[in-house]
Amino acid sequence: MVACREGQRQVLLKRADDAEKLAAELPERASRLLAIAAGYLREAAAVYDIDPTLVGDPTGRERDLDLIADLGRQFVALVRQACRPEHPRWPVVDRWAEADALAGCLPVLVEQARAVARPDHDTTEGSAEISQRRLAAVHGQVWAAGEQLEAAVRRAASLPYP
């Protein structure tokens, strides 16, 4: 999970840039995979343009974008390792197979992220639906805050009047 939620879009774009820079230095197979990953990372970042209310959403609608950002980080490292057979930590073939599998997951995750994005976030209906879902996601916190407020008022009411 990315620590700074508001920077999630920038993190995705930076990971895409990192993948593209590395692609220029590596063999064709790695370059192809990194270019594919960079494209999907950019598409994931564009989901925030479709629905900026995803930032910090307590309902979990941002989960796929978090996963894409983390996979983007892992993907770049995995492809770099696959290109270095002199470090036999894992068999190189397995690293390539894993990189291919991760590249195959990215379009599915981007599509899922697009599916939960609400392009109608700036309409009355869309905004109301988003607000209802956010409130439902934190209803326990709202309830607890209400109980604390009620207890504070009871304590204040029990104090003698000066």
Image: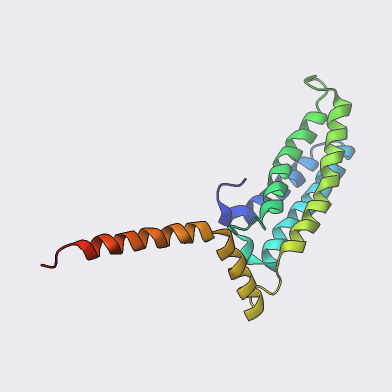
Q: Which residue lies at the image location 67% right of the left edge and 62% below the top edge?
A: 48
For the residue pair 61 and 132, the one nearer the viewer reads as: 132
Q: Which residue lies at the image location 62% right of the left edge and 53% below the top edge?
A: 8
For the residue pair 62 and 150, the one nearer the viewer reads as: 150
Q: Seen in the image, is 9 located left or right of residue 139? A: right
**Residue found at the very far left of the displayed protein:** 162
Q: Which residue lies at the image location 73% right of the left edge and 35% below the top edge?
A: 77
Residue 36 image position (x, y, % from top left)? 84, 49
Residue 94 image position (x, y, % from top left)? 86, 28
Residue 139 image position (x, y, % from top left)? 53, 61
Quarter of the image holding residue 153? bottom left
Say which quadrant the C terminus sits in: bottom left
Colour treatment of the image: rainbow
Q: Which residue lies at the image location 57% right of the left edge and 54% below the top edge?
A: 5
Q: Is residue 85 above or below residue 142?
A: above
Say which quadrant the N terminus sits in: top right
